[in-house]
């Protein structure tokens, strides 16, 4: 005989379903760079000028009681912080606001702030989507100074980080002290086994410090905002106090209920906020940064860099960009030694052959060529999939691009 029962499936519509009000998610992550670099007072205009020591004076011994005293000079240069804008608009139908059980704007706003920190770190450190008005990224600046270390040399990670020729020594050779390091989370496993000569670990963990981890006593961060690009670098170290930034407009949130939203590419109107009963959350942030790189006794020509990095197993592709400065004569041209070539903040000085060689990733760069007694020249350099050669004529009235 069949036995009938009113089971769970028969009364499913009547059973209360408990919903936990808490949204399980990790806490929003902040910018690693902005937490380590030096913050300047807020900008009062789109561009801020920083005066930088460019040339150091020299003292000379005097020969005897009647020897002639020699002269020297000191000079300054300008480095500019230009404010670039980060912004996003998040459109939401008003009916969604009304029906939601949680504060949607309260959930979205911190995640947008996190996205801003991610974009800042990726642009400044790795050059990812770098604004055109900004100088070159930290990786590019370090690469031109020769502060890149390749792991293909067969050295272990102790030598690659702290040994002679390692990333720490690259920074120190240019006259700076390493004050911080940044690495991806996966790099922890490479650091845990490192020991000094006394068999003590050089990678330490202390939950009581503001920076939880240290590498040879230097704070090291492992960004969790998705900004680190391990295909470009395994480890970035440097004197972060030499990198500066300033805010022109702090993160500003505004709710829009009128207006239209267009497709950035086609310019077609996608949403009409008033007509479609929608609200849009607009977030805007403006800031600028620079690595001024002033002249020091250990970096008098300003070709050094306060940062260095450890390359991945397969280094990112770069192209050689060669500048040659001569007097422009057709037969037996005279090469000019000591001309300064500044490519987006990376400085090199021409050698005896009048050449300065850069290694640049694909992109568009601004090059400024200067030499004392000559008119400077600025030009655009486009780097694609082949080496680039630039020849410049120098004369007493100026430098003329060939």
Image (spheres, rainbow, N blue to C red):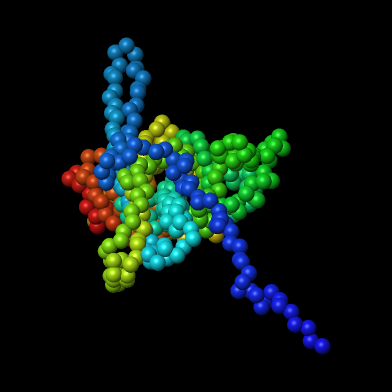
Q: Can you tell which quarter of the image residue 255 is in?
A: bottom left
- Give the position of the N terminus as an image quadrant: bottom right
Q: Can you tell which quarter of the image residue 75 is in?
A: top left
Q: Is residue 63 visible?
A: yes
Q: Position of residue 306 (x, y in %)?
A: 45, 40
**Residue farthest along the bottom direction in this orientation:** 1
Q: Is residue 391 left or right of residue 27?
A: left
Q: Position of residue 330 (x, y in %)?
A: 24, 56
Q: Is residue 341 visible?
A: no
- Give the position of the C terminus as an image quadrant: bottom left
Q: Is residue 75 left or right of residue 163?
A: left
Q: Can you tell which quarter of the image residue 16 is in?
A: bottom right
Q: Is residue 325 above or below residue 39?
A: below
Q: Which residue lies at the image location 42% right of the left edge and 63% below the top edge?
A: 98
**Residue farthest along the right direction in this orientation:** 1
Q: Is residue 125 left or right of residue 379?
A: right
Tally the marks: 0
Q: Is residue 331 above or below residue 15?
A: above
Q: In this orientation, which residue lies closer to the viewer: 205 or 60? A: 205
**Residue farthest along the left direction in this orientation:** 397
Q: Is residue 102 above or below residue 78?
A: below
Q: Which residue lies at the image location 63% right of the left edge and 52% below the top edge?
A: 154
Q: In this orientation, which residue lies closer to the viewer: 225 or 145? A: 225
């Amino acid at each position: 005989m069949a036995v009938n029962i009113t089971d769970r499936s028969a009364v499913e519509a009547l059973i209360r379903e408990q919903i936990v009000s808490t949204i399980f998610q990790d806490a929003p992550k902040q910018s690693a760079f902005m937490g380590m670099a030096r913050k300047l007072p807020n900008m009062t205009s789109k561009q801020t000028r920083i005066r930088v020591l460019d040339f150091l004076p020299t003292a000379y011994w005097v020969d005897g009681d009647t020897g002639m005293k020699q002269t020297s000079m000191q000079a300054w240069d300008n480095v500019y912080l230009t404010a670039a804008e980060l912004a996003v608009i998040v459109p939401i139908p008003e009916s969604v606001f009304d029906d939601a059980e949680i504060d949607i704007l309260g959930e979205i706003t911190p995640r947008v702030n996190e996205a801003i920190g991610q974009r800042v770190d990726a642009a400044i450190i790795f050059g990812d989507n770098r604004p055109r008005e900004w100088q070159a990224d930290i990786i590019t600046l370090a690469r031109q100074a020769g502060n890149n270390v390749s792991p293909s040399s067969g050295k272990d990670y102790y030598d690659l980080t702290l040994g002679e020729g390692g990333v720490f020594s690259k920074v120190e050779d240019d006259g700076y002290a390493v004050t911080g390091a940044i690495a991806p989370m996966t790099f922890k496993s490479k650091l845990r086994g490192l020991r000094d000569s006394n068999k003590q670990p050089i990678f330490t963990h202390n939950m009581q410090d503001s920076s939880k981890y240290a590498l040879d006593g230097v704070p090291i961060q492992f960004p969790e905002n998705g900004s680190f690009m391990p295909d470009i670098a395994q480890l970035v170290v440097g004197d972060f106090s030499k990198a500066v930034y300033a805010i022109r407009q702090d993160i500003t949130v505004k709710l829009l209920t009128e207006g239209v939203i267009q497709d950035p590419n086609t310019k077609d109107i996608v949403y009409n906020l008033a007509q479609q009963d929608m609200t849009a959350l607009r977030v805007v942030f403006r800031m600028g940064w620079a690595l001024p790189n002033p002249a020091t006794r250990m970096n008098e020509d300003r070709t050094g860099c306060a940062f260095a990095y450890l390359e991945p197993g397969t280094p990112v592709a770069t192209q050689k960009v060669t500048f040659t400065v001569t007097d422009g004569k057709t037969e037996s041209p005279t090469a000019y030694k000591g001309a300064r070539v500044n490519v987006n903040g990376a400085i090199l000085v021409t050698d005896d052959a009048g050449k300065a060689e850069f290694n640049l990733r694909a992109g568009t760069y601004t090059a400024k060529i200067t030499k004392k007694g000559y008119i400077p020249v600025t030009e655009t350099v486009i780097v694609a999939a082949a080496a680039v050669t630039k020849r410049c004529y120098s004369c007493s009235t100026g430098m003329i691009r060939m």
